[in-house]
Image (tube, rainbow, N blue to C red):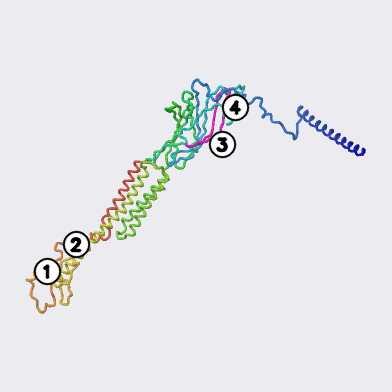
Amino acid sequence: MPYYIKFLFLIFCLILIGECRKHKSRKRRWSGAVESHKHGAPLTGKKIVDNTKSHKVKTDHLLRVDDHDFTMRPAFAGPAVPVGVDVQVESLDSISEVDMDFTMTLYLRHYWKDERLSFPSTTNKSMTFDGRLVKKIWVPDVFFVHSKRSFIHDTTTENIMLRVFPDGHVLYSLRVTVTAACNMDFSRFPLDSQTCTLELESYAYTDEDLMLYWKSGDESLSTDDRISLSQFLIQKFHTTSRLAFYSSTGWYNRLYINFTLRRHIFFFLLQTYFPATLMVMLSWVSFWIDRRAVPARVSLGITTVLTMSTIITGVNASMPRVSYIKAVDIYLWVSFVFVFLSVLEYAAVNYLTTVRDGKDRKLREKAREQSLSLAREQSLPCTCGMSHTGTVMVDGDGTYSEADTNSLAGYTRADAPEDTPEKQEHMVVHLTLDNESTGTKKKARFRSFSLMQNTHAIDTYSRMIFPGSYIIFNLIYWSAYC
């Protein structure tokens, strides 16, 4: 038993000796590497320490952020802090007529001096920081007046830059997208020009504490030449500034970014004006259609009226519900009136034609009755419809023929010769149906009757009045709004 214990103890001692030797050799290798690195010997495959990550002085200590109270503005209780502003417009994203607003993306930069942030520098170079330092120092509280929505871009990090110069001057820049209200006047729509304004103002500091101004005047606003909109032409950008008064808080400096937009008319010519004009011209086609073709003229009139209603509804659907008349409303409603009048014109033509046909029918029936009564009194056949002066030879069998009786024109029944056996089979009757008619009057009456049979006089006048009136309206409209 003691032999086994001795043997195990011996093995344990050998293991301890081997581990001690390995530890000594590893320590010898690491110490040799450090010594060679100190003497400039290269290290292959070894991690090199980045000395740029180890600052001798922290930023907070360099700017003395903890030594000052940055909840107060610079030169507190002293004169107003001048804060210069400049803006670079990156894009004008959209203009909404329905919501009366616009969306713009811009770079907003502020310039001021805060001596609390000054630091010693031999090279006079500035230091640039991201948005994390902004939360520790004082920055101007500029906001957008009449803005509906706005946000600072945060991809991939917050788009905020802070640059501090050794003498304490500060540049604070951020990238913002803002949607602001724009009071639009649509009285000349779509031949209008709109002027929209983006307003900047300090929220808390009055003009006695903070003086907001454009850093370089009109040159403080710069735009990208590639900015364009589908429906508008950007005419110009310009800046202004003035004081704004609030009854409860006082006077504030306010900066304005003004831009003028002129609407492109070609889209509305294709989508609104040309279709409306074609519908009006199509309604005139009914003036050349026979007045007896009731289905053709009625269907054409109803189709044009419904089409004009659809055009008016489509235009108003994309517009705000304003309480005044727009230029496009004048054109569309006048066009609608022309189309509607063409339907009423045919209604008048149809009514007058029906009345005239009724009167003609009554006259024919009355003439037929008079002819029949005269024929019964004289035992003569009816001469209804005869429109000339002549003589009718009535035979004994009831047939009659027309002959020249100039020699009997002045005879009466008593003057006529007595019947002879040779002439008992014939009876000569002289009927004068229209003693005042002449050849010229008969031709004029025939022409007028033919005209009334083919087209009504109202259709004839409408062919000239409707196009002429619409052309005059267009000349007045386009000369007034263009």
* The magenta segment: 148-177
Whether residue 404 sits left or right of residue 68 in the image: it is: left
Q: CA distance from mark 2 to mark 3?
A: 95 Å
Q: Name the residue that disc number 2 marks.
A: 442
Q: Earlier in the sequence, mark 4 or mark 2?
A: 4
**What residue type is disc 3 on?**
Asp
Cα separation between marks 1 and 2:
21 Å
| Dot 3 and dot 1 residues touching (CB under 8 Å) | no
Q: Which is closer to the viewer, label 1 or label 4?
A: 4
Label 1 sits on a secondary structure element that is: helix
> In the rendered image, which residue does mark 4 sit on?
127
Q: Closer to us: mark 2 or mark 3? A: 3
The crowding category of the residue bearing disc 2, from other C-alpha atoms within 10 Å (few below 14, some 14 to 19, many at least 20), is few
Q: Which mark is residue 198?
A: none
The extreme front residue here reads 1
**What residue sits right under mark 1 in the picture?**
406
Q: Residue 289: where, in percent of width, then height?
A: 32, 58
Left or right of residue 278, residue 127 in this image: right
Q: Is residue 297 left or right of residue 409?
A: right
Residue beneath disc 3: 154
Give the residue type at disc 1: Asn
Q: Reading the chain from its start, which is encountered first: label 1 or label 2?
A: 1
| Image depth: mark 3 or mark 1 in front | 3
